[in-house]
Amino acid sequence: MKRRLRQRQILQLLQITPELGVGEVCERLGASPATIRREFAQLHAEGRVEKTWGGIRAASALPAAAGPPAFSQRLVTNSAEKRAIARAAAGLLEDGDVVIIDGGTTTFHLCEFIALKPIRIITNSLVIAQTVDRLKGPMLGAEIHLTGGQLQPESGVVAGPQAEAFLRQYHAKWAFLGAAGVDERAATNYNEAVLASERLMIGQSDRIALLADHSKFSRTAMCALCPLSAVSKLITDTHPGTQALLQRIRHTGVDVLEVSAH
């Protein structure tokens, strides 16, 4: 890989993850530790990143991840937890899989872990589609299929009859969805305009992964997304405030995966 391309991909990773370590970037880009340390040093010398212990972080001048302002504001809330959840979810995918990804700030964190995977992605999120494409660059990796529909300006998601007609054409092994609220009975969301598309994502997929950080538990949003019995795997972060509820959810038969954000 040419040096400038590698540096551009490092900067793109920093738009999603504010701090990066040498080992993590080696894994993502397939380069040696010595090569990545040289790239870090060059980027620091040019003032494009700041050094940390064992890695780099985004300089203050670096732009935030692309997306509507409201989306970008939500993206920084519990970002470490969301990233850990997304990493675990990406680990469910195998080469050649088809996955439907609903737009959201937790599912957005999937981008850095799936961009270079040989999979097919179907999404209703302009932000996810653009970010995967940027991270992949000219390299082989994920194939992106973007639904049509009416743009929801606060989320960068498209919805409506066109999106629904598009989704009916496809079948996926996995659907990855977020939620605004989760309890032992159901997952709920706020955006009624997207609800029909989300239910189609569930209906067109073999398995459903619900990605929800601890702040979503014991909350109920306006719209019922799906009963929790429809969820194949619930992925969340480990938090003392959710243990009792997660135990009750497990007793209903839902497969719960807890991950550490640290």
Image (cartoon, rainbow, N blue to C red):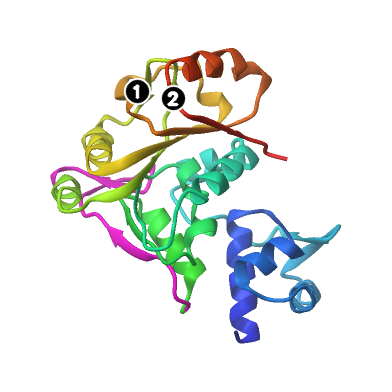
Q: Let me know if residue 190 is in the magenta part.
A: no
Q: Let me know if residue 157 is in the magenta part.
A: yes
Tell me if residue 226 comes above or below residue 67 in the rendering.
Answer: above
Provide residue 240's location: percent of width, then percent of height. 68, 19
Say if residue 63 shows up in the picture.
Answer: no
Looking at the image, which residue is at 38% across and 45% down? 103
Mark before the other along the chain sequence, 1 or 2: 1
Provide residue 67's location: percent of width, then percent of height. 45, 52
Q: Which residues are magenta?
A: 139-161
Determine the CA span between mark 1 and mark 2. Answer: 7 Å
Q: Secondary structure at mark 2?
A: loop
User: Which numbered tag is attached to residue 229?
Assistant: 1
Q: Residues within 10 Å of mark 1 (few under 14, many from 20)?
A: some
Name the kind of residue labelled 2 in the image.
Val
Q: Disc 2 designates what residue?
A: 254
Contact between labelled residues 2 and 1, with CB atoms less than 8 Å apart: yes
Residue situated in front as seen by the camera: 184 or 47: 184
Q: Residues within 10 Å of mark 2 (few under 14, many from 20)?
A: some
Residue situated in front as seen by the camera: 61 or 183: 183
Looking at the image, which residue is at 21% across and 54% down? 148
Name the kind of residue labelled 1 in the image.
Ser
Query: In terms of image quadrants, where is residue 202?
Result: top left
